[in-house]
Image: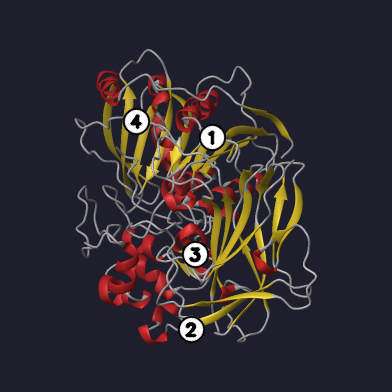
């Protein structure tokens, strides 16, 4: 999702426990002083092929005795601070790279902040360009690189680019620019398909993220360096209460708050299904013809662009089989690898400072090899993945990992979960879903959008009557899930539409010890969320053509939960929970077939939901097991 960025301040080849404590030796103040002493800051309006000029900042080493490569980030989130006498405190992808003295470039993309032109959300890519007016993000990237290599003194003629989230999309789009100077790209948590990752999840509108984001991300008619005032104020710190009792309905978020003032927010109301508007904003089919090295980076606990991370890597790998395409996933939230630690998320400890390890030993090495010195082989594998549960980095020569065996984990009566298929002739579990009392996505008071929920203790949901839980017996040996998880469900509803939320959970043993950094947290029987996803049922057959349920009729519904690499340790249990809301992470479903963006309060109704686990209608998880 596109939350405003605050970062501006496989057969395993081996399994190893490297030296992960890699503290960065300099303070922010020391880095800030280094930049002022060793870099000159310049600002330009760089003209694109159609005449539009884009604001571009260049931090260039003062030392002119050598030639330096260029590292570029294109962003819709501002190049701030503006002015050649005002410096960022740190520049580049991470601090470990600062003293390599790259020429670091930041650019406001078309129609954002100090740049000219009209901004288009996830600019549709044009595979064929016949005129100078046929522009997209690949042409703007090409024209920028071309200008930089011809106009910035002492550049080596080699260019790299990186970006996280929305800038990750611009990195992906720029990777197909085909400029010969572009040698390395790193899309990180990249937005890839706006409907699938940011605006919606399988048809369910991500109301809290979008409602909060577009209050500040507004259209602009001319270049500016001033942040616009918000359309409205939200002084309620409790997002669950705010969206349920003040925003009330998805419809009222527009009628009562945005009131047609933000075209980007309103686009969701005009295009609730996966139509041409969204298809044009899917960059994945266009990631072809890439001739340089790529490193896709993401976090297992990315609360915003999990789909974009895995599918950008997979699309590049499939469509560009002859390039070096590296994949890195750690135990991070959205952009967490750019932080200073990454060791803990909520109550979960990953055992080491994984962020600086990645910065020094993976990211810095990648760019150094392709932009500075490629005389020695790059000692990075195809995929470097952090295995959660056991808390260790693993290295793979392919992704998904070779040797992963696909198995089915079946739901049974009495809340059982096992690899044995059910034999009962008639068996189901049911619950009543009330959209006027939706299941919260988190037990904590927050603004409705939180990263912590990705590993949060699910005991708050386990006790609710509108949540089903299925669990294995206590595991007699470690169980490692690798790759995709798919929930293959047989369901029924008394209504004509319903949402289905599937959660995979690691249940700790009853005698799990306390953590010294989390006094008061009871880890005995802790239910750590590993993966979850929501699916709006009317899109079960076709995301472009919604279809009602026939009330009380057994219906097939499949949910992709995204990839994992997680070990459920001996003595733990694996649990699956099923529910019909995760509010306000996703908007409420009135549980009758209609355009939810037009639903009134009176339309929201209770419904009885059934999940079947019988011989003729088995529900199960399709998982990959890595021995």
The residue carrying pointer 1 sits among few (fewer than 14), some (14 to 19) or many (20 or more) residues within 10 Å by Cα, namely some
Q: Considering only order in the chain, which callout, 4 or 1, is on the residue closer to the N terminus? A: 4
- Name which residue lies at 33% across and 25% down: 60
Q: Is residue 569 left or right of residue 458?
A: right
Where is residue 179? Give x, y as percent: 52, 38
> In this rendering, which labeled residue sits more in front, label 2 or label 3?
3
Q: Considering only order in the chain, which callout, 1 or 2, is on the residue closer to the N terminus? A: 1
Residue on which the image places disc 4 = 91
The extreme front residue here reads: 511
Where is residue 401? Give x, y as percent: 71, 41
Secondary structure beneath dot 3 equals loop
Any part of residue 43 in sight: yes
Residue on which the image places disc 1 = 180
Q: Are marks 2 and 1 in contact (CB under 8 Å)?
A: no
Q: Is residue 290 left or right of residue 417?
A: left
Its colouring scheme is: secondary structure
Secondary structure beneath dot 4 equals loop
Viewer-nearest residue: 334 or 342? 342
Can you tell which mark lies on residue 594? 2
Where is residue 407? Give x, y as percent: 76, 54
Calculate the distance from the C-alpha at mark 2 to the C-alpha at mark 1. 51 Å
Residue on which the image places disc 3 = 463
- Name which residue lies at 20% across and 32% down: 86
Where is residue 31? Give x, y as percent: 30, 23
Q: Quadrant of residue 599?
A: bottom left
Secondary structure beneath dot 1 equals loop
Calculate the distance from the C-alpha at mark 1 to the C-alpha at mark 4. 25 Å
């Amino acid at each position: 999702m596109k939350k405003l960025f605050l970062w501006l301040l496989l057969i395993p080849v081996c399994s190893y426990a490297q030296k992960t404590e890699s503290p960065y030796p300099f303070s922010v103040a020391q880095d800030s002083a280094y930049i002022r002493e060793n870099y000159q800051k310049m600002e330009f309006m760089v003209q694109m092929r159609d005449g539009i000029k884009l604001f571009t900042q260049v931090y260039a080493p003062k030392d002119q005795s050598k030639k330096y490569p260029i590292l570029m980030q294109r962003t819709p989130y501002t190049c701030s601070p503006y002015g050649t006498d005002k410096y960022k405190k740190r520049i580049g992808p991470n601090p470990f790279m600062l003293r390599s003295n790259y020429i670091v470039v930041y650019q406001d993309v078309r129609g954002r902040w100090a740049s000219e032109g009209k901004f288009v959300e996830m600019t549709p890519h044009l595979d064929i360009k016949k005129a100078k007016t046929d522009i997209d993000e690949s042409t703007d990237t090409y024209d920028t690189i071309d200008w930089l290599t011809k106009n910035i003194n002492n550049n080596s003629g080699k260019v790299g680019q990186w970006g996280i989230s929305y800038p990750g999309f611009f990195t992906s789009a720029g990777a197909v620019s085909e400029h010969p100077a572009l040698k390395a790209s790193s899309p990180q948590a990249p937005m890839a398909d706006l409907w699938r990752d940011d605006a919606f999840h399988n048809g369910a509108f991500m109301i809290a993220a979008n409602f909060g984001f577009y209050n500040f991300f507004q259209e602009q008619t001319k270049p500016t360096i001033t942040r616009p005032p918000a359309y409205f104020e939200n002084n309620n710190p409790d997002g669950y209460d705010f969206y349920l009792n003040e925003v009330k309905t998805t419809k009222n978020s527009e009628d009562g708050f945005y009131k047609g003032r933000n075209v980007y927010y309103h686009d969701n109301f005009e295009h609730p299904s996966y139509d041409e508007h969204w298809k044009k904003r899917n960059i994945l089919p266009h990631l072809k013809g890439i001739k340089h090295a790529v490193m896709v980076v993401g976090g297992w606990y990315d609360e915003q662009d999990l789909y974009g991370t895995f599918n950008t890597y997979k699309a590049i790998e499939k469509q560009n089989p002859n390039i070096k395409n590296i994949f890195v996933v750690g135990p991070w939230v959205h952009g967490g690898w750019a932080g200073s630690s990454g060791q803990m998320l909520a109550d979960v400890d990953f055992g080491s400072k994984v962020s600086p390890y990645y910065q020094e030993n993976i990211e810095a090495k990648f760019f150094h090899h392709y932009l500075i010195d490629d005389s020695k082989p790059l000692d990075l594998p195809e995929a470097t993945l952090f295995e959660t549960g056991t808390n260790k980095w693993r290295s793979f020569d392919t992704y998904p990992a070779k040797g992963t065996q696909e198995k089915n984990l079946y739901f049974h009566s009495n809340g059982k979960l096992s690899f044995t298929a059910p034999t009962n002739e008639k068996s189901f579990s049911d619950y009543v879903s009330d959209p006027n009392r939706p299941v919260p996505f988190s037990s904590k008071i927050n603004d409705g959008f939180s990263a912590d929920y990705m590993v949060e203790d699910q005991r708050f949901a386990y006790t609710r009557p509108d949540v089903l839980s299925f669990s294995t017996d206590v595991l007699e040996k470690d169980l490692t899930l690798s790759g995709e998880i798919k929930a293959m469900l047989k369901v029924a509803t008394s209504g004509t539409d319903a949402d289905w939320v599937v959660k995979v959970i690691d249940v700790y043993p009853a005698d799990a010890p306390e953590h010294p950094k989390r006094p008061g947290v009871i880890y005995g029987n802790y239910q750590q969320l590993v993966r979850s996803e929501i699916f709006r049922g009317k899109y079960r057959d076709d995301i472009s053509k919604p279809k009602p349920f026939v009330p009380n009729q057994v219906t097939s519904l499949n949910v992709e939960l995204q990839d994992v690499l997680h070990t459920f340790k001996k003595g733990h249990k694996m649990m699956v929970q099923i529910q019909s809301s995760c509010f306000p992470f996703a908007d409420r479903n009135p549980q009758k077939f209609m355009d939810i963006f037009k639903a009134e309060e009176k339309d929201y109704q209770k419904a009885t939901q059934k999940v079947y686990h019988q011989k003729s209608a088995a529900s199960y998880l399709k998982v990959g097991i890595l021995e």
